[in-house]
Amino acid sequence: MASRRNPGPPSNLYVPSLDGMRAIAFLVVFVAHSLPHRVLPGGFGVAIFFFLSGYLITTLLRAEAERTGTISLKQFYLRRVLRIFPPCYLTIILVATLARVGVVYNVESYKSLFAGFLYFSNYWNILGWGNLPAGLGILWSLAVEEHYYLVYPLLYAWFVRRGVSRNRQAAVLLLLCAAVLAWRCYRAMVMHSSWENIYEGTDTRFDAILFGCVLGIVANPVLGDRVKWLEKNARLLATCGAAMIFGTFAYRNQLFRDTIRYTLQQVALMPIFFVLIRPDRNRIARTLEGRWLRHLGLLSYSMYLIHHTLFHHFYHYRQPSIWLAAAIFVMTLAYAQAMRTFVELPIRRWKSRRARCKTVVVMRRSNPAVRVAG
């Protein structure tokens, strides 16, 4: 896994094709929920989201460490809170209110909202205490990611403070992934846990995020990593990865699905993502960089938050159909666009103003001439 690096990471870490991948991940989930009576791999869309989160967070943390020599946990958690909490909490409040007054169909208990606000809904459901009302049960995946956000930056900051090499960092994470696979096997074969409990548990799914972290640590073209054997065989490995993913869908054995399938899918995603983030901008990456697909990726978080509530409501009163699903997609898109316009973008502008003010303060403190001129 040893790699050579070009000197200095680029200043711009944005990879347009990854917004396209967000859109693909959401569309996989949306189509699966639009056809509830057919077995479609909607969970694979969630797996893509998990992998993407691991890669992106690791890239940002690693770039910060290489630039400053340390990790600001305070700034990391502030960024995550401002990005994740407002759309999620506003959606929970809106949906719960509409359900309470009878506008949105609901049969679940409102006491489960407690778990939604604390990002504990996956274990709340696993423990049998109930599910979030009005289609908000999909928040289980956000709970898994929030648990990752709480723990992983601490581990990575420890890596940085101790000067752990990147190869050893990756080895530690891969050992954790192997431990999760062993735990899934034990849960499925010895404890006979249900597939839902294995599917939604942080303890059984966080390796899906860690595989993305491994890619971000040792084979990250965005940060200048050079892995010759991977670059030479990237397209072949990505093709093999795609074939492996399709194979995991074709093999329907339940024990396989509850145990090794998750691992194989995440391993298969590694060369696929590597091809997408390479600077050569291959045909698939250019397709994912299309304007509308990238915009859909930017809206995918809010779309994910609201879409299942709409299916939960309209599919209760009407027969599922492609036209109804299309109408739900339009409503989902409109909601996400409103969330971006009135919530996400104002928060981003506030963050930019705050960052500029901090920069001015630092300059004035470090340069008397600037302070006098000011």
Image (cartoon, rainbow, N blue to C red):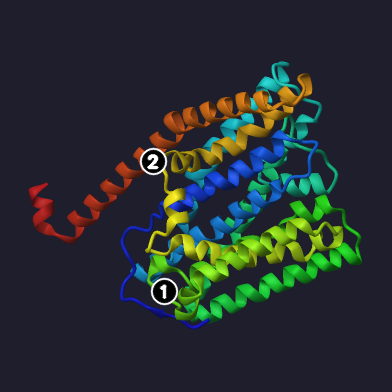
User: As drawn, is 108 to the left or to the right of 202?
Assistant: right
Residue kind at label 1, given as amino acid type? Asp
Q: Secondary structure at mark 2?
A: helix
* Residue drawn at point x = 45 percent, y = 63 percent: 59
Q: Which residue is mark 1?
A: 225
In the foreground, 323 or 94:
323
Residue 62: x, y in percent? 44, 67
Question: In terms of image quadrants, where is residue 249?
Answer: bottom right
Q: Which residue is mark 2?
A: 348
For marks 2 and 1, give the one nearer the viewer.
1
Residue kind at label 2, given as amino acid type? Arg
Question: In terms of image quadrants, where is residue 75?
Answer: bottom left
User: As drawn, is 129 to the left or to the right of 352?
Assistant: right
* Residue drawn at point x = 62 percent, y = 32 percent: 306
Residue 230: x, y in percent? 50, 76
Q: From the viewer's perspective, is residue 309 above or below residue 209?
A: above
Residue 275: x, y in percent? 48, 64
Q: CA distance from mark 2 to mark 1?
A: 30 Å
Residue 365 is labelled as none
